Image (cartoon, rainbow, N blue to C red):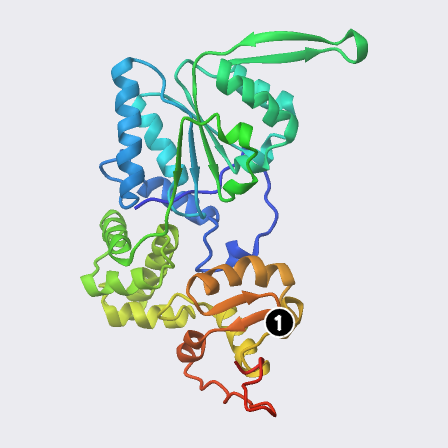
Amino acid sequence: MNWDDTTGTPGEERLADPAAERLVGSVADREDQAVEAALRPKDLGEFIGQEKVREQLDLVLRAARARGATADHVLLSGAPGLGKTTLSMIIAAEMGAPIRITSGPAIQHAGDLAAILSSLQEGEVLFLDEIHRMSRPAEEMLYMAMEDFRVDVIVGKGPGATAIPLELPPFTLVGATTRAGLLPPPLRDRFGFTAHMEFYEPHELERVVHRSASLLDVGIEPDGAAEIAGRSRGTPRIANRLLRRVRDYAQVKADGLITRDIAAAALAVYEVDARGLDRLDRAVLVALLKLFGGGPVGLSTLAVAVGEERETVEEVAEPFLVREGLLARTPRGRVATPAAWAHLGLTPPRPAATGNGQQDLFGA
């Protein structure tokens, strides 16, 4: 069981995120963070999934320990909830080093970063979540810190300003990002090891659910774990959140044991269907199919039809629908796929014929 939490500096307030309000959202809320802290694996041996990443990272850490040196800087990319924060903590544990956790949005000025770097101990791991959102001045300071373990602190302003070099102890930076393409090449190239976190297979999520159920002292049958895993969107964080809700249902409506039927009934109450779609996902598909005949339809029009903001539909609902092959983005607008019609049990409209006997583009 592995997942990230949404990190930040103490007292940092986050803006409301529509994804954080969904049962199948991959953004961690405060409840998730509290539970995840208790369920996180402590070493690579306990970490489930991401086989290639684990194997490669194990070699990097073992080699560093054999040399008696700090590990290379590590960049972890991938969707929220796949294990980036967990891996950063495992890196620190495997190296026997303390870890400092902060996030890109919390570092607004180069001085913020300089204060953090200057207080690091030798060998310490600095975990920088959402590294792509760090300010540009701080980013440029980070180049030198990563490469030469040195920063130049500017004292004064104008012609009288002086750069004072500040030597840093060797440290390991672990950067995490959900959008690796936004990282500038000079920053990306300074990481000695880069890994991309993939979505989990259902059998891996079953292991995640079983492990979490054991730690939470929840009775669960193999078919119950499979039912939860199949609705978890390939994301351990979502699997653990669904497990907690199904546990509540089993305790109130049954004898506390999670079976396939109990899991299915519980998730029906929470409007999470067999493919992991929730109310918003289905609302988008229903509007696209019933109101617009499967499309194409513009994003703004689709958002108005479901009563949501354009950004909510585009950033919260669409990515999973596209990944599941239920919706396609085209130059003409959003189009439903045959799988979407089948999933909702609807029949696609018959293609209209043009005067020359060819199908109309709208019905094609």
Q: Residue at x 26, y 23 (%)?
A: 62
166 vs 216, nearest the viewer: 166
Residue 115 location, x and y as percent?
Answer: 58, 18
Q: Which residue is situated farthest in the left direction here?
A: 222
Relative height, residue 354 to residue 217 (above, below): below
Kindly identify the amino acid type of the residue bearing the numbered disc 1. Answer: Leu
Q: Residue at x 54, y 85 (%)?
A: 359
Number of numbered markers: 1
Relative placement, left or right, of 29 versus 297 is: left
Q: Is residue 110 visible?
A: yes
Q: Secondary structure at mark 1?
A: helix
Q: Is residue 11 visible?
A: no
Q: Which residue is situated farthest in the right direction here?
A: 159
Relative placement, left or right, of 251 versus 125 is: left
Q: Residue at x 60, y 7 (%)?
A: 165
- What residue is pinned by disc 1? 302
Residue 119 location, x and y as percent?
Answer: 51, 15
Q: Looking at the rendering, which quadrant does residue 333 occupy?
A: bottom right
Relative height, residue 289 to residue 10 (above, below): below
Relative placement, left or right, of 137 versus 86 is: right
Relative height, residue 65 to residue 139 (above, below): above
Residue 176 location, x and y as percent?
Answer: 46, 37
